[in-house]
Image (cartoon, rainbow, N blue to C red):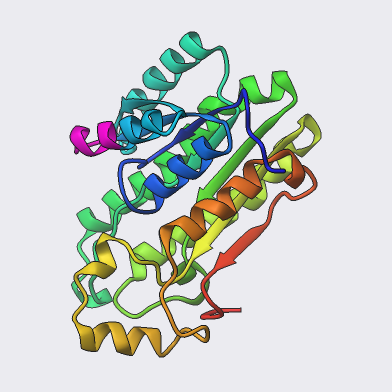
């Protein structure tokens, strides 16, 4: 069940955190994984080499999600080399926190360019060949704050909410061609961002999670494997919440 043998999967922001977990989970289920990164080539190579050491197949591919020209060039090259990209996990994103009255235009614009337009551009670049093949899976990585909001994260929450709207719209456009489009909305997950929390901050945040703990990147990766699988062929336009009951 949930086998992805013969499928080619591109994961944006795949060198660490949730993206890395998605790469590893997809590879475990048989997909050939393309690990995208902007900075940190060593980390991306570590992901790919780790997958290969476990008998999987992976390669790295650098491009900046804030540069749509670079996206198009890179994906065109991947399509020429592999023939198709069956699965897109549009995971890359950046966050700059700050209260509304201190929000800088350049920070908001940078988050919008990467979190929203960059990932939408990736979907646009892979959609045509998915439609021709009449099979494809696109999964956007939103966030619990895109649904519930959070003080100090106005621009970030707006960018993640935008991905939910994009998910629902693109799903309607591509459904008749066998391409599903869904989103995951992780809550409090153990990543680099949460690793910097103090013990007191960690305890305070976990109080808002009914299951009483943070989630792991692997749990998000497992959800993406399901949405990428043949078994999820009748699921599209859906937002899968992975938040321990933090928002329902």
Asked if the magenta segment contains residue 44, the reply would be yes
Question: Compared with residue 144, is residue 12 higher up or lower down, i.e. above or below?
Answer: above
Drawn side of residue 60 relative to residue 176, left or right: left
Question: Compared with residue 192, is residue 42 higher up or lower down, i.e. above or below?
Answer: above
The main secondary structure of the magenta stretch is helix
Q: Which quarter of the picture shows residue 118?
A: top left
**Residue furthest out toward the front:** 54
Asked if the magenta segment contains residue 140, the reply would be no
Q: Residue at x 71, y 28 (%)?
A: 135
Drawn side of residue 96 relative to residue 55, left or right: left
What is the x, y in percent for residue 67?
A: 31, 32
What is the x, y in percent for residue 22?
A: 46, 46
Q: Residue at x 66, y 37 (%)?
A: 3
Q: How many marks?
A: 0
What is the x, y in percent for residue 232?
A: 73, 46
Q: Residue at x 40, y 39 (%)?
A: 12
Question: Compared with residue 132, is residue 184 higher up or lower down, i.e. above or below?
Answer: below
Question: Compared with residue 103, is residue 29 higher up or lower down, i.e. above or below?
Answer: above
Q: For this rendering, which residue is in front, 222 or 171?
A: 222
What is the x, y in percent for residue 180?
A: 69, 41
The quarter of the picture where the C terminus appears is: bottom right
Magenta part of the protein: which range? 38-46
Q: For this rendering, which residue is in front, 106 or 36?
A: 36
């Amino acid at each position: 069940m949930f086998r992805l043998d013969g499928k080619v999967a591109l994961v944006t922001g795949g060198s660490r955190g949730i993206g890395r977990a998605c790469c590893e989970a997809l590879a475990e289920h048989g997909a050939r994984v393309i690990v995208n990164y902007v900075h940190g080539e060593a980390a991306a190579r570590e992901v790919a080499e780790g997958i290969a050491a476990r008998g999987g197949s992976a390669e790295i591919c650098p491009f900046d999600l804030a540069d749509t020209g670079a996206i198009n060039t890179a994906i065109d090259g991947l399509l020429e080399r592999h023939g198709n990209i069956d699965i897109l996990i549009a995971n890359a994103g950046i966050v700059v926190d700050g209260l509304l009255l201190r929000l800088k235009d350049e920070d908001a614009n940078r988050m919008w360019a990467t979190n929203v337009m960059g990932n939408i551009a990736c979907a646009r670049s892979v959609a045509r060949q998915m439609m021709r093949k009449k099979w494809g899976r696109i999964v956007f990585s939103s966030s619990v704050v895109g649904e519930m909001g959070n003080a100090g994260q106005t621009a970030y929450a707006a960018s993640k909410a935008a991905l939910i709207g994009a998910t629902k719209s693109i799903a309607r456009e591509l459904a008749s061609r066998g391409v599903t489009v869904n989103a995951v909305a992780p809550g409090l997950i153990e990543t680099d961002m949460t690793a910097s929390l103090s013990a007191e901050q960690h305890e305070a945040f976990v109080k808002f999670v009914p299951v009483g703990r943070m989630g792991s990147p692997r749990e998000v990766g497992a959800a993406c494997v399901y949405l990428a699988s043949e078994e999820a062929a009748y699921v599209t336009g859906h937002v899968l919440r992975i938040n321990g009951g933090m928002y329902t």
